[in-house]
Image (spheres, rainbow, N blue to C red):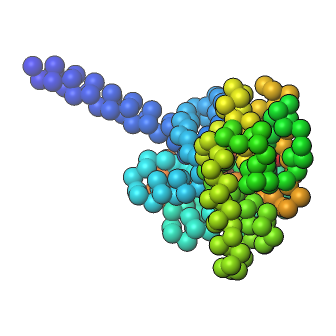
Amino acid sequence: MRSILTALTSAMLLAAASSAALAEEELSLYNWGNYTSPELLEKFKKETGIKVTVTDYDSNDTALSKVRAGGSGFDMVVPSANFVPIWIKEGLLLESRPDQMPNFKNVDERWVNVGWDPGRHYSVPWQWGMTGPVVATSVYKGDINTSAIWLDPPQELKGKINVVPEKNDVLYAAIRYMGGTWCTGDKALLKKVRDKLLEAKKSWVSMDYGIEKMDSRDTLAQLYYNGAAFRARQVNADIKLGFPKEGYSLFMDSVAILADAPHPDNAKKFLNFIMAPENAALISNFATYA
């Protein structure tokens, strides 16, 4: 009997050890939807044995609220530049020191001493791009280089407009359209911006993350991102991106490790991995941003 118990105990210990080892070969990435290259993840797993699972979000506010609540179980997140200081200030990010990793030498100098993470002690560049009007030009043949597409839409587009649910992108574009500058404190102007958005919203069908509705023609115009617009154009050649003469916003998203990451060592391996040029290229080739 003692031999049987000993054998059973040994088997249970081995099973527990195996489960723990498998758990250590995991990594959880919390990222914008349709923004992570499957080929990148497959290559990372092949080279390191670490399997990455991805959970999507649709805005900076959504991601921040989820992680603030605690117990997310995520290892990494990909906030935009203007949100990174908030994450750092609130103690939500691990000071993982990407600047001391072997592949940091490959990061372009322009993206090293950035205002939101000087010297890159917390984050690594993911992608950058711009936000602008995306239009089905077979339906609307007028000027698309203006935010009027979604703020003062022509009749052909009314009721067929989707606007990205990222508040900063919406507000920045609307402020510029109304003649203001970013971070303005002009209360009278901001009231006009609010009124303009409330009026324009009557012509929108949705505020969703995703450009797939243009593929099916459920929407004919969007305020959206350049990389997604390029992918949509591969389905419908008449889809074009406008560069508003009133002004438009650029964005830079960076990947960082969460302070309570379950697998911080695996996450550090991932940060170093994506700083290799050939791996960074996999991200760009998939998402079609820079």
Classify the position of the N terminus by image quarter. Answer: top left
In the displayed structure, does residue 145 sit left or right of residue 78?
A: right
Indicate the position of residue 289 as horizontal and vertical percent values. Answer: 79, 43
Residue that appears at 73% across and 62% down: 174
Residue that appears at 86% across and 46% down: 144
In the displayed structure, does residue 122 sit left or right of residue 177?
A: left
As rendered, which of 179 and 85 lies closer to the eye? 179
As rendered, which of 141 and 167 lies closer to the eye? 141
Indicate the position of residue 172 as horizontal and vertical percent values. Answer: 72, 63
Indicate the position of residue 52 as horizontal and vertical percent values. Answer: 56, 36
In the displayed structure, does residue 214 sit left or right of residue 91?
A: right
**Which residue, as the protein is rendered here, is positioned at the far front?**
155
Q: Is residue 7 visible?
A: yes
Residue that appears at 19% across and 25% down: 6
Indicate the position of residue 94 as horizontal and vertical percent values. Answer: 55, 61
Residue that appears at 69% across and 38% down: 160
The answer to whether residue 102 is above or below residue 162 is: below
The answer to whether residue 217 is above or below residue 86 is: above
Q: Toward which corner of the image does residue 220 lie, by quadrant?
A: top right
